[in-house]
Amino acid sequence: MDVEHLGDDLTEVLHTEAELHARLAEMARQIEADYADGPPPLLVGVLKGAVMVMADLARELRFHAQMDWMAVSSYGAGTKSSGVVKILKDLDADITGRDVLIVEDIIDSGLTLSWLKENLESRGAKSVRICTMLRKPEALKVQVDVAYVGFDIPVEFVVGYGLDYAEDYRNLRDVAILAPHVYSA
Ligand code: IMP
Ligand code: MG
């Protein structure tokens, strides 16, 4: 789906599909270099938002990129983070002694990711790093160490490239700001 298929639902495109892909390629080169001395990390995607970035990052990486998935609750249908994290779907893989790279669509408050990082570390992972396509730096409520960031974006509610509002807009190719009339109606 493209921006022109969405009428006036969006106010501004922040990053086009081409920009996202170009930035992912740069991040992949960095990830390859950082993990060059050991086995490739297990990529852990956070459903459902990270599906697009996982699919594109994994294909860009020039090593065997095994993928696993978790689903955790965050926003429900609203636009504010609750800080309450619940595991809806757990990993299939045993991560004891493994290097893990969490792949995320966006870090907003950071509450979800800081919780998830600690959770995976407590299972005996050798290392846990975070890779995110987008980050809202001004919205960070907790300190999270993020190894790879695609783009820092303003504190606006964005959709597309996996990001949803009430499960819609995930299949928009670009990342765009959702018009307030859509969620305040
Ligand atoms: P955090 O716990 O506040 O960092 O939020 C994490 C999750 O909230 C992300 O993985 C997204 O699913 C969702 N989220 C945060 N900001 C946005 C946004 O602007 N649009 C859509 N989803 C968002
Ligand atoms: Mg979401």
Image (cartoon, helix red, strand yellow):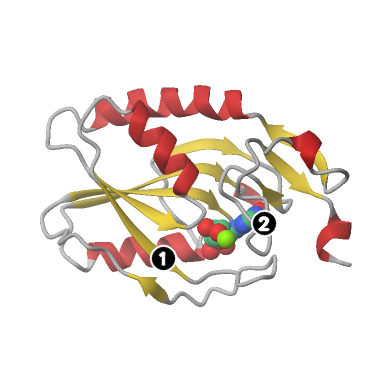
Residue 139 in sight from this viewpoint: no
Residue type at tag 1: Ala
Q: CA distance from mark 2 to mark 1?
A: 17 Å
Q: Callout 2: 10 Å neighbours few (<14), some, many (20+)?
A: few
Q: Which residue is mark 1?
A: 71
State the image coordinates of residue 75 (x, y, percent, origin top left): 60, 69
Residue located at (60% from left, 29% from top) = 17
Quadrant of the drawing holding the N terminus: top right
Residue type at tag 2: Asp
State the image coordinates of residue 9 (x, y, percent, origin top left): 83, 49
Quadrant of the drawing holding the C terminus: bottom right
Q: Quadrant of ligand 1?
A: bottom right
Q: Earlier in the sequence, mark 2 or mark 1?
A: 1
State the image coordinates of residue 52 (x, y, percent, origin top left): 49, 42
Along the line of sight, the residue nearer the viewer: 51 or 122: 51
Q: Which mark is residue 166?
A: none
Q: Secondary structure at mark 1?
A: strand
State the image quarter where residue 5 is shown: top right
State the image coordinates of residue 138 (x, y, percent, origin top left): 65, 51
Name the front one of labels 2 and 1: 2
Q: Is residue 98 left or right of residue 163?
A: left
Q: Would you say the beta carbon of the disc 1 residue lies within 8 angstroms of ligand 2?
A: no
Mark 2 touching mark 1, by CB under 8 A? no
Residue 67 in sight from this viewpoint: yes
Along the line of sight, the residue nearer the viewer: 125 or 165: 165
Residue located at (18% from left, 37% from top) = 40
Q: Callout 1: 10 Å neighbours few (<14), some, many (20+)?
A: some
Residue located at (44% from left, 60% from top) = 113
State the image quarter where residue 41 is shown: top left
Q: Secondary structure at mark 2?
A: loop
Q: Which residue is mark 2?
A: 168
Q: Would you say the beta carbon of the disc 2 residue lies within 8 angstroms of ligand 1?
A: no
